[in-house]
Amino acid sequence: MRYSFTGKNVTLTDSLKERAQQKLDKLERRLQKDAEVNVIFSAERQMCKVEVTIPLKKRILRAEVTETDMFAAIDSVQDVLEKQMVKYKTRIRDKYRKDASYKDEINYLPQEEESAEEMPLKIERIKRFALKPLDAEEAAMEMEMLGHAFYMFRNSRSDEVNVVYKRKDGTYGLIEPEY
């Protein structure tokens, strides 16, 4: 695996890099040999955050963990990525014959590592609505008025479908399609 380390408000020491690489190397047996792993270390106030992104052919594995200790965050982020891989496996286990690309991206875990309580993905409700042409600020106001965490709309400037969402820190995000 190829690693890319970035530090925000953190001095990247060799021990940090080695610990992250040691923990994330445990995922190597389930990933492609040439997988690219992007690790971002950041610190704000008394909290340390580790973000790991692993782009695959058609999917992205991403984990973000905030702890009081950087080494504890590294340990936790590896556990989160492991759980994501198991979750993907259980969701796609019956369908992988139809979509062989997933089989190439992540090697399947042994049967005994699956969690029995994992529920299959089930869509409970389908909602249809007309997309209003709005700008991002108007969409954020609509979202707040409705009390939702996200809002889909047609961007009046680009005429594309966009999503505005509320972030954990209280700011807003905008998702635009890329072709």
Image: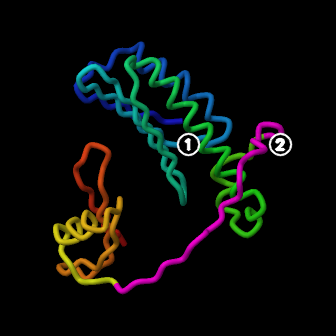
Is residue 163 left or right of 114 when viewed as pictured? left
Return the x and y of residue 95 as percentages of the image width and height: 74, 65
The secondary structure that most of the magenta stretch takes on is: loop
How many discs mark residues in the rendered view? 2
Q: Nearer the viewer, residue 178 or 74?
A: 74
Q: Is residue 90 above or below residue 15?
A: below
- Image quadrant holding the C terminus, namely bottom left
- Image quadrant holding the N terminus, namely top right
- Magenta stretch: includes residue 124: yes
- Residue for point 55% across, 36% down: 80
Instruction: Give residue 138's quadrant in the image.
Output: bottom left
Q: What's the residue type where badge 1 is placed?
A: Asp
Dot 2 corresponds to which residue? Answer: 111
- Residue for point 28% across, 66% down: 143
- Residue for point 30% across, 50% down: 167
Dot 1 corresponds to which residue? Answer: 34
Q: Secondary structure at mark 2?
A: helix
- Magenta stretch: includes residue 74: no
Q: Is residue 89 above or below residue 78?
A: below
